[in-house]
Amino acid sequence: MTTKPKAKKFRIRRPSDEQPAESLTPRLDQARAPQSAPAQKPRPVPPPPTNAARAPAPEQPPRPRPAPPPEHSAAARTAPPQPQQQQQQPQPQPQAARAGQVDSARQVSAETDMDAIKQEGLTGRQLRMARRVAQKHGLAPTSDFDAVRLLRARGIDPFQRTNMLELVRPEQKQPATTEPRMQLPQTVEVKKETLPSTQMASPAERRAAEILKIQKELASRRRKKMALLMVRLAFFVLLPTIVAGYYYYAVATPMYSTKSEFLILKAESSAGSMGSLFSGTQFATNQDAIAVQNYLISKPAMLRLDQDVGFKEHYTQDWIDPIQRLTENPTNEEAYKTYKRNIEIGYDPTEGVIRMEIMAADPQVAANFAQALIGYAEEMVDNLSARKRATAVRDAEADLENATQARYDAQERLVRMQQEGNIVDPEGKIAALRAQINTYELQLQEKSLQLQALLDNPRPNSAKVDGARGDIRRLEALLADLNGQMTQATVGEDSLAEKAVQIKLAEADLATRDLMLQTALERVEQARRDADTQARYLTTSVEPVASEDAAYPRKFENTILAFLIFGGIYLMISLTASILREQVAS
């Protein structure tokens, strides 16, 4: 609701030296004269003197004059009362009428009204406003003062304050009337012959009364808005909160919570590697813990829990409230929603601990659920590395078979080379030839010395000389034969040197195959030991224990939360509605 703005300023015109004080009231008296004429019939007032041009004016009925602006009316009311003779202002004396230029009574009256309007001291803003209002009503004024005169002649107050909302009101069809619409105060017949009171309120008192009236209207409007606001809050916020609180305090079935904690540890390995640096920490079992967490909150875990402990049967009992209770024959999807709502499993990567909380209508049932889920988690941990261990054993055994076959092939190749050359050790034969050559060379040197000694005599013995020369000849032939054998053994594809190299390579290959076979045997033994032992362990740090007091629902906290939720929804909707209302209005 919007009220029209009230006047907040009053203008009091004070008399100056050039204009006497009694000249302020005649304008008001001229404006009030037509309205107060019926009330002043018992006290006739002599008419003011007029000239010949205004002679027919008294024969016309008095015309109603519009009330002056508020500031002029207030100034007139504050002025002291003047006698009747001083209130009558003499009209300006027009010039004598010339022959053939006699004005009509209407023209003279219009000029008189224009002079009275000019004497009212209207501001330029008021005159511009009057011209705009006159143009709006289809008038054609010749000046701003003429616009004021024409509007007052039609009974329209050009200075009436209008509300901004009234400026955009749709135009309403008015019935066609011959009489102009009067918006100014009209004279009312007084039934009782009473005179108007001379006691008039001061402008300050009237202003205080209007301010008090506005304050009362604002207070009333504020109380009404506050009452409507309280009704809306009670309907949209308090009532749903009361319903939610009634459910939590009187209807909701108490749920018992069982909490447990467990962690996954990796078996210590004797082999030194980079992986052993993180053994025993959460980094070594981070992936396994995440896999176990995802498995426990999955649908297969819920189905297995239902088969082993009876999850659906527990939540379909009649004494559970309808909101938390499952239907008679629930589907797996409905049961899974209840499963996720009543089972919370979280993993802390900094500590490597898995925390689990089970909620059920019976504390012992909640503990049984927790024990079953921990067993499923332990089996899951064992199954995570079972395939890996089996694959490791299978690969190790295959490597052992390959190493055994490779060693057998290398050994067979070495034996065949030795059989083909009829030499078990070619290097030994070459060494024996070299030893023989060295021995025969020494003997050849000795025989050469003996022959030289015999030839040094003046008369050498011919028999000894011939024998020494024969020995030397035979040694040289033997050395030549040995050197030939040595050359044949070291040169060519079938030489002893070539055979010695091939045999040496075959022996090296056999040694390598022996080492690989030994390594494969060690891997098989290690894989079998790892397969026989458990690689990861699930340790329960907090065992599940049946609780004695119900943990859910949290009545007070849930009620406050419902109040905040409904209040936020109402606030958001009200803000949206107000914004849309402003957009539509603009």
Image (cartoon, rainbow, N blue to C red):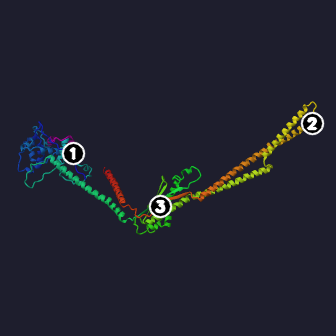
**Residue closer to the observer: 470 or 291:** 470
Q: Is residue 99 magenta?
A: no
Q: Which mark is residue 543?
A: 3
- Secondary element type, mark 2: helix
**Which region is colored magenta?**
113-132
**Residue closer to the observer: 354 or 450:** 450
Res 279 visible:
yes
Q: How far apart are labels 2 and 3 at the CA level?
A: 115 Å
> Comparing marks 2 and 3, which lies closer to the viewer?
2
Q: Which mark is residue 134?
A: 1
Give whichever of discs 1 and 2 has the lower sequence position. Answer: 1
Question: Where 310 falls versus 147 (above or below)?
Answer: below
Q: Which residue is denoted by mark 2 in the rendering?
A: 464
Q: Position of residue 123 (x, y in %)?
A: 19, 41
Q: How many numbered marks appear? A: 3
Residue under the image location 8 percent in, 46 percent down: 58
**Circles 2 and 3: CB atoms closer than 8 Å:** no
Q: How far apart are labels 1 and 2 at the CA level?
A: 176 Å
